[in-house]
Image (spheres, rainbow, N blue to C red):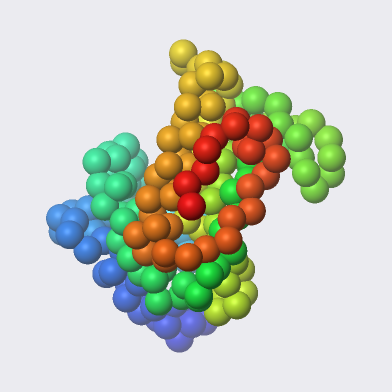
Amino acid sequence: MKSTEIYQMKRNLLTFLEKLTKGLSKPRKKFYNDILYGMSKAQNTLLSDIARALEEKIDLQYTIKRLSRNATEENDLKQIHQNYLNNLKTAIPDNPLVIVDESEIVKPYAEKMEDLVLVRDASKNVPEKGYPTLNFSMATPKTKHPLQLYNHLYSSKEEDFQLEKTRTMTLSSLRILYTILNCIIGHYSLAIEKNIARLNYHYCE
């Protein structure tokens, strides 16, 4: 990337991150700034490449350890998600279409990622290593792609995994979704993938 493109990308990203990390401590704001800018510049999610992209004037291993240590903290994720939803309000049209579906993240070349399971690669219609996901998104004419509202990744190899637990998680996520929709949207149309609809949950209106 050209230096002018990198500068513009970083400026736009930092403007967005200022809204996304509102209410967080300075160290946590710095972590999110570093990790997202590093991913954007490196064009991948490998921690070592993210650290290199930051070009800090310290030993690379110190940067990697700092990012890794901060990545294990999850206490501020709810605040991040709420800030994200608050910023979505400006892109929400009247009566938007909200889509609820199950999908997958495919990792065909992964060997050491934890709790990998077989999922069906929808693009090739074949079994492949990866993780199932539960996704809530919103279609809007103001953006080229659907806006993500909520995503959850899980694995049947997780410790104490139970199918009923997954159903409970799905219903809990749906309740969270309806609370979000009713608070920030009001009126909307809902499209639910049939496997989720089989849970026989009484959907809120």
Towards the viewer: 36 or 50: 36
Towards the viewer: 36 or 18: 18
Q: Position of residue 61 (x, y in %)?
A: 33, 44
Quadrant that contains the N terminus: bottom right
**What residue lies at 52% left-to-right and 26% top-to-bottom?**
166
Q: Position of residue 202 (x, y in %)?
A: 52, 38
> Left or right: 129 with respect to 174?
right
Quarter of the image for residue 31 reads bottom left
Residue positioned most to the top: 160
Q: Is 22 drawn above or below residue 132 in the view shown?
A: below
Residue positioned most to the right: 125
Q: Position of residue 62 (x, y in %)?
A: 28, 45
**What residue lies at 60% left-to-right and 77% top-to-bottom?**
141
> Left or right: 140 with respect to 48?
right
Towards the viewer: 62 or 92: 92
Whether residue 1 is visible to the viewer of this picture, yes or no, is: no
Towards the viewer: 64 or 89: 89
Whether residue 71 is visible to the viewer of this picture, yes or no, is: yes
